[in-house]
């Protein structure tokens, strides 16, 4: 088995373009396009606190179930993709709903430097703070 050890990959045609061939060998993709550019795992039951993150500088609490995640390094434009989830602690149920109801996270507003997100209990319109929030940002860094 061969091993490559390096601190930097540079594309042959363009420095930022490193092409990867798919597992089946039929298609190629740009390596940097498939990487998560920012992510965060945090608690926002009362005062938001980050457990771990990449390229996130702060969280701003705007009230129950509404917060903004600010990035350390900006995205190139506001056409990025966000994936998120939130979860209630099943041992305590602040909304008084049946335990195990899926929660929903929505992107409210976004810019190159930040994403404002809301969380709701189940399919209701009741906003809620959750003990577990996770967010990933995929797109082009500036």
Image (cartoon, rainbow, N blue to C red):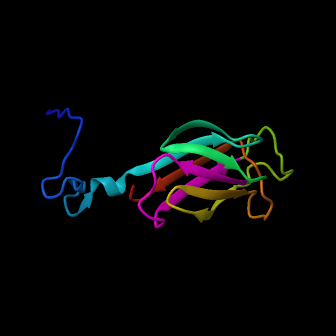
Residue at x-position 34% and y-position 57%: 33
- Residue 52 image position (x, y, % from top left): 55, 36
For residue 49, which quarter of the picture? top right
In the picture provided, is 35 more to the left or to the right than 133? Answer: left
Residue at x-position 20% and y-position 34%: 6
Q: Is residue 82 above or below residue 44?
A: below
- Total marks shown come to 0
**Magenta stretch contains residue 74:** yes
Viewer-proximal residue, 72 or 127?
A: 72
**Magenta stretch contains residue 107:** no
Quarter in which the C terminus is drawn: bottom left
- Residue 92 image position (x, y, % from top left): 81, 40
- Residue 100 image position (x, y, % from top left): 73, 50
Q: Is residue 49 above or below residue 73?
A: above
- Residue 51 image position (x, y, % from top left): 60, 35
Hey, which residue is sitting farthest right in the picture? 96
Residue at x-position 23% and y-position 40%: 8
Hey, which residue is sitting farthest bottom in the picture? 79
Viewer-proximal residue, 49 or 133?
A: 49
Q: Magenta residues, as a range?
A: 66-87
Viewer-proximal residue, 86 or 51?
A: 51
Quarter in which the N terminus is drawn: top left
């Amino acid at each position: 088995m061969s091993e490559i050890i390096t601190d930097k990959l540079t594309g042959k045609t363009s420095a930022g373009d490193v092409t990867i061939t798919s597992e089946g060998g039929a298609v190629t993709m740009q390596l940097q396009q498939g990487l998560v550019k920012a992510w965060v795992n945090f608690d926002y039951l009362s005062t938001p606190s980050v457990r771990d993150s990449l390229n996130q500088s702060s969280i701003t609490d705007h009230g129950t179930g509404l917060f903004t995640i600010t990035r350390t390094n900006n995205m190139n434009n506001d056409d990025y993709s966000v994936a998120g989830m939130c979860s209630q602690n099943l041992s305590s149920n602040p909304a008084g709903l049946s335990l195990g109801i899926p929660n929903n996270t929505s992107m409210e507003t976004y810019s190159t430097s930040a994403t404002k997100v809301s969380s709701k209990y189940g399919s209701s319109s009741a906003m809620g703070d959750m003990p577990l929030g996770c967010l990933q940002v995929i797109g082009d860094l500036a």
